[in-house]
Image (cartoon, rainbow, N blue to C red):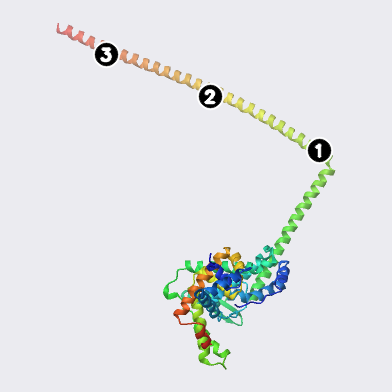
Amino acid sequence: MKYKPTEETLMAYLYGELEGDQAGLVERYLEENPEEKQKLEELSDTRLIFNELEDEDLPGQLAFMAPIKNEEWLYWRKYVAIAATLLLILTFGWLTGLKANYDEEGFYLGYGEIQRGVSEEQIADMLFENNASMASYLQENIKVGQDSLNYKIDAIQASNSNEITIQRIFERERDALITQMVDLNDQLSGDYRDIMRQIVVNFSDNIETQRIDDLRSIQAAFTDLEDASIGKQFQLENALVDLEEKVNAVIANNSNNK
Amino acid sequence: MKEIDLMPQTNFLVTAAKSGDVIAMNQLVKQWQKRIYNFAYKYFNDYDLAMEVTQKTFISMNKNLKTLKDEDRFKSWIYRIAANYCHEEVRKQQKRWVFPFMKVQSNQEGDQIENSPSVVREENPEKVFANEELKTLLKKALATLPEEQRLIVIMKEYEGLKIREIAEIIDISENTVKSRLYYALGSLKKLLDQWNINRETVHYEI
């Protein structure tokens, strides 16, 4: 059987990587097949031509970091940002009437007309005064607090040392209070008795007076009735007299006529 | 094939850096930053993205070096980190929706052509221009490869990794690596043919 190397074997031969006696076999095959040899030589020439391409030098030092895109823009970006910020501030200032001024007294910033504020010395004075008043106020308060504390401490000390005295005072005060209460009670009792008696007397007096008045009025009424009865009796007597006279007259007339 | 320096001190530096030696860590970064940067630059053909991946790779290295058990595997380990960040960046770029007019045209190509003659003033300006033009075309050709093929071509052709190492880094079989290399070289050859670039014209121009 005739030997025919594969494409892979030919490649290994071309690159000189055939092992053992295979190279010899391929060489013999190529000698016997000039067309194949020609083909392989053309491939070898192709390799030679491509080896004209030489190595390039590194364009720069490795930075061990991913290269940043658009480096130029990144470089200018911060300046553009600063310019834009300044423009924004200027526009804002112009729109709002913001005014800034600088002289030997300092830097002023304000909307509309700048009004000078208090100077540094004035502020210092104000601060000093404020501090002084605060200090005196605090001192007073501390003093008052101290006095009050001292007084209380004294009282506590006194109470501790004069317990017996306090007990005595307490007893005396208690007795006085009891006496007062008894007096008050007595006084209240006496008064009530007088008032009640007075009320009873008044009441009885009233009753008596009313009875007398009633009796008087009854008596007067009886007197009036008596007087009226007597009057009526007189009238009746007079009337009877008149009637008698009239009757007599009538009789007399009758008798005369006869 | 281009062979990179063997960096014999790497193992020693890795051991020292793992134990917290800041100077060793810095040396390690100095030693590897150019490799990782060029790996990412060829992958994206963009300085900024390459720098970003390089930064991230070394930040990750600084953070996770202690977890590396075998110092001999440092090379595979660091390329694996870088490859992961490259892949992540591609996904991010795909997700990012950009207005067409917002896309900033890369002026790197122009810069290269403008700047290079000052370095090699004594050379023939036409030759220099041709050389720069060739490099621009080669970068363009690399950019046309699918992501998984481009990654392997860069690792193999420019970083000098062995097929076994690439397989380990990307976590695929060695045969898959070889297969992808085969198709990638085929695609690149086709492009060079289209642009009429071959060994003779290149050597004539250079």
In this image, A186 relative to A59: left or right? right
Amino acid at circle 1: Gln
Which amino acid, mark 3? Asp
- Percent across and percent down for residue B80 are 60, 67
Are both tags, 3 and 1, on one chain?
yes
Residue B36 shows up from this direction: yes
Q: Which residue is mark 3?
A: A242
Callout 2 environment at 10 Å: few (<14), some (14 to 19), or many (20+)? Answer: few
Which three-letter amino acid code belongs to the residue tagged 2?
Asn
Q: CA distance from mark 3 to mark 1?
A: 110 Å
Q: Is residue A257 above or below residue B56?
A: above
Which label sits in the foreground, 3 or 2?
Answer: 2
Please tell me which residue is depicted at 62% across the width and 67% down the height of the picture.
B165
Pick the front one: B185 or A249? B185
Q: Residues within 10 Å of mark 3 (few under 14, many from 20)?
A: few
> Left or right: where does residue A72 sit relative to residue A132?
left
Is A153 or A67 nearer to us in this picture? A67
Where's residue A208, x and y in %? 53, 21
User: In this view of the protein, which residue sits in the foreground, B164 or A86?
Assistant: B164
Which circle's residue, 3 or 1, is located before the other in the chain?
1
Q: Which residue is mark 1?
A: A167
Q: Disc 1 to disc 2, how far (Cα)?
A: 58 Å
The residue under the point 58% across, 71% down is: A13
Helix, strand or loop at disc 1? helix
Which residue is most to the left? Answer: A258
Q: Which dot marks residue A149?
A: none
